[in-house]
Structures are given as structure tokens and as C-alpha cells.
Amino acid sequence: MISRRHLLYGGLGIIGLTALRLGLTRPEDAIEIVLRKRLDYLVLEPAGVAAFAIDFTAAGVMARGKLRLIAAMAPLYGWLPADETTPNAVRHGEERIVSAYLLSSDFFSSGADTQQPVNYRGLFNPWKSRDACNNTFARREAEAI
């Protein structure tokens, strides 16, 4: 028979393991998990994904606590479907990460080809230009004719 003492110790053990798992995770892990889940149809450069995760976390775009929580719940997070049944807050955060990564890579400048590897070029900042024209969707004069 289970006594209150055993139940209390079991509850404290679960809380301790959860706190340990949460304490050992990094926000960068969550970003990598989201990118691999949502962009599974693309060939992502592993070093580029890791560099993007570090830059994105350092920029402070998303709360580090939320990212660590996603990383701690990685096994359960993988079961969430990537459709409209996913809660809006989770889906919105995923879309922010994926959009920032695709804009920060050479995906659009290489013609949005899903067969080519996607390489990270640097964290996208619309206020600082990398090229003569920073808009990845802009057509050059020669292409417009």
C-alpha cells in the first residue's frame, strides 16, 4: 500500500528531475529543435543552424525562459503536430524562429530551391544592409525586363 510519505517522496523526485532537466537545457537547443521540426523538408547546414541559434538567442528576440522550457520538453514537443491544432502561442513562436532563419540564410537568394543546402549567412536585420539591396524578394533591373 502506498503511504503519504512514499507519495510525497515520489512527487519531490519528479519535481527534482524536472528542475534538473530544465536547468541543464540551453535556449539554443530549442531553436535547433524547432528548425529541424518545421524545416524537415530542407537540407540544413548543421553548423549554420547552431550559429543561428546562438545569434538569435543573443539578440533577445524571444524570452530565454520559454526557449528553455521548449528544450526541456523536447520529447513531448516532437509529438505536437505542425498544423492548426497546435496552440497559437507555440505556432507563433515557431513561425518567428523559422522566418528569421530563412531570411538570415541564402534560401531566397538561391531561388528557394528545396534541393540545395540552406546556408546561414548572418542574422537578418532589415536596418543594416548586407548587400546593395537588402530585400531578398526584390528583382534587379536586369531581371525585371
Image (cartoon, rainbow, N blue to C red):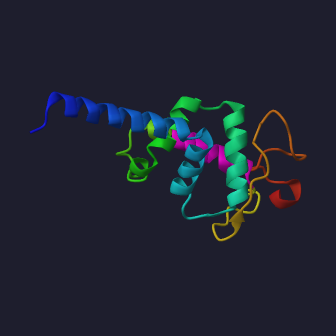
Above-or-below relation of 124 to 127: below
Q: Residue furthest bottom?
A: 115
**Position of residue 15 measured from the top left corner of the image (x, y, whole percent):** 36, 32
Q: Residue 40 location, x and y as percent? A: 54, 61
Look at the picture and state if 122 lies above or below 18: below
Q: Is residue 135 visible?
A: yes
| Residue found at the very far left of the displayed protein | 1
Look at the image and tell me in which quarter the N terminus lies.
Answer: top left
Which of 99/46 is in front?
46
Q: Which residue is depicted at the point 65% across and 32% down?
A: 61
Q: Is 135 rendered above or below residue 113?
A: above
Residue 54: x percent and y percent? 70, 42
Residue 99 part of the magenta segment: yes
Q: Quadrant of the C terminus?
A: bottom right
Question: At 20% across and 29% down in the image, what residue appears?
Answer: 5
The outermost residue toward the right is 132
In this orientation, which residue lies closer to the viewer: 89 or 32? 32
- Image quadrant in which you'd find residue 13: top left
Where does residue 3 sit, x and y in percent of width and height?
14, 32
Q: Which residues are magenta?
A: 93-105
* Left or right placement of residue 144 versus residue 113 in this view: right
